[in-house]
Amino acid sequence: MHRACFTGHRSEKLQQTETVIRRMLERERLKATDSGISVFLSGMARGVDIRAAQIVLRLRSAGRDVKLICACPYPGFERTWSRDWQRQYRDVLAADLVKYISPEYSPACFRLRNE
């Protein structure tokens, strides 16, 4: 089974508008699904990770046969974020599978998530 992973910069580091970012992510998702990929992984960071996961969930809601796996570094990873980002994070946890890489923060949890 082929899978695609989304990763990228945080929104504040991108030099494009949210609209442009979403269009770019949608183009990449289309390429992936056109090549037979139906399982997507998100590292659940603010920015590209969550935006891409939202696109996959919208496809799934529209009846497309796609799956989303969330690879969260540890429970509570999002607790220092703004309320809006926390809400988006929680909404994306409606994924097909949510995996917490570590039971709590550790210096290695992000490296392990990326692997």
Image (cartoon, helix red, strand yellow):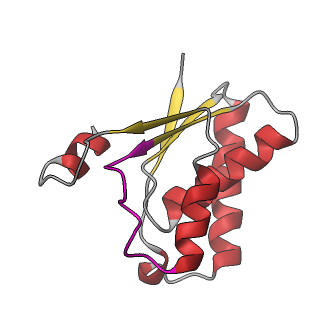
Q: Is residue 34 left or right of residue 49?
A: right
Is 79 part of what is drawn in magenta? yes
Extreme residue toward the left, this view: 107
| Residue displayed at 21% across by 54% down | 105
Q: Residue furthest right?
A: 62
Q: Give how far across and how far down residue 109 sits, in percent.
A: 21, 48
Q: Is residue 103 left or right of residue 94?
A: left
> Residue at position x 43%, y 76% from top?
81
Image coordinates of residue 52 in percent, x first then y, are 60, 54
Q: Is residue 68 above or below residue 15?
A: above
Is residue 64 depicted above or below 87 in this figure? above
In the rendered view of the protein, which quadrant contains the C terminus?
A: top left
Q: Main secondary structure of the magenta part?
A: loop
Q: Please report the residue visible at 88 percent of the width from the left and 41 percent of the height from the top.
A: 62
Asked which quadrant contains residue 16, the reply is bottom right
Q: Is residue 88 inside the magenta stretch?
A: no
In this rendering, is residue 50 above or below 114? below
Left or right relative to 115: residue 61: right
Q: Above or below — where is 99 with respect to 27?
A: above
Q: Seen in the image, is 64 located left or right of residue 35?
A: right
- The image shows a total of numbered marks equal to 0
Query: What is the x, y in percent for residue 61?
Result: 83, 42
Q: Split into 4 quadrants, where in the image is the N terminus?
A: top right
- Using the image as rendered, state which of residue 98 and residue 63 is in the foreground: 98
Give the residue drawn at x 30%, y 44%.
114
Task: Please state the horizontal and vertical placement of residue 72, each as a whole percent of the image.
Answer: 39, 47
Q: Which residues are magenta?
A: 71-82
